[in-house]
Amino acid sequence: MRILKNLSILFSIILGNVGHSQEADFGALQSLGETSYHKLYDEELDQDYHIFIRSPEIAVAGKQYPVVYLLDGGITFPLLGAYYRYLFLEEELPELVIVGISYGTNDWKKGNNRSRDYTAPAASRSFWGGADKFKTFLNTKLFPFIEMNYAVDKSQRIIFGQSIGGQFVLYAAQTSPDMFKGYIASNPALHRNLDFFLQSKSDQVTQSKLFVSSAGDDDSRFRGPALKWMEHWNSEEQRPWDLNTVTLDSVGHFSAAPQAFRQGMKWILGK
């Protein structure tokens, strides 16, 4: 009986220690490097944005680094920020600053307004069409904040977006082709407003690069419009940017994101 009682006390101590909640130490996630967090409020959109920044692990004083902005950062920042560490160790990519833009929730009722922020207008969706205001938020709030507080080279801005995040990448590329050095659109969801993206065109010619990928196993409602976009823009004699369109085999709508990030970043940065 004494042995059973002692074991009971021991298990209570162990379980108590395991169950005790502690403040998160993000430094223990070495794949995310030196990660910092800020919350930015935008009055025009009445929206809180949760901003996560992965800084270079060994920053050189006075040096400025390319910066990549990840849309849907609540998912893409931990996924691609961690994956980037392997790409850096493999010497496929240089040191970067990575910025994840998150809504802090998956629920639109609680503030996930990606369908508003990332899209051009669509007749079938009254809440679509806020891409221009979101672009203003980036230019007037987020970029100045990042460039004031982190060692980034604003001439080497890159943006990555998946699905309707990819739609925003194309919106920015087609309406403001000099906003970023590089644009990466992974499986852009153009199924509700494809005509806008076939007609919208800037006369400006830039040195920017646009990488657009479509997964070979993507759902046909996304795959079909993406291929039509690629065919249309590949046939244009003059484009605002250098264009690279690819099909990623053996991946689907969501599983394609790491491949799109890797190939797009290497092409844009010339690695």
Image (spheres, rainbow, N blue to C red):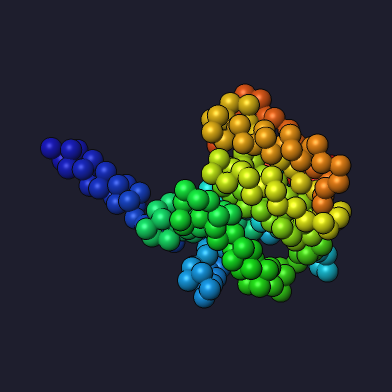
Residue at image coords 47%, 48%: 124
Residue situated in front as seen by the camera: 94 or 143: 143
Which x, y percent locates residue 66?
78, 57
Residue situated in front as seen by the camera: 271 or 158: 158
Which x, y percent locates residue 153?
80, 63
Occupied quadrant, residue 134 = bottom right
> Would you place residue 86 above or below residue 81 in this image?
above
> Would you place residue 219 above or below residue 70 in this image?
above
Which x, y percent locates residue 233?
76, 40
Placement of the C terminus among the 4 image quadrants: top right
> Can the viewer see residue 110?
yes
Residue at image coords 43%, 51%: 106
Residue at image coords 62%, 36%: 225
The answer to whether 180 appears left or right of 141 in the picture is right
Residue situated in front as seen by the camera: 149 or 177: 177
> Would you place residue 269 above or below residue 24 in this image?
above
Residue at image coords 35%, 49%: 18
Occupied quadrant, residue 244 = top right
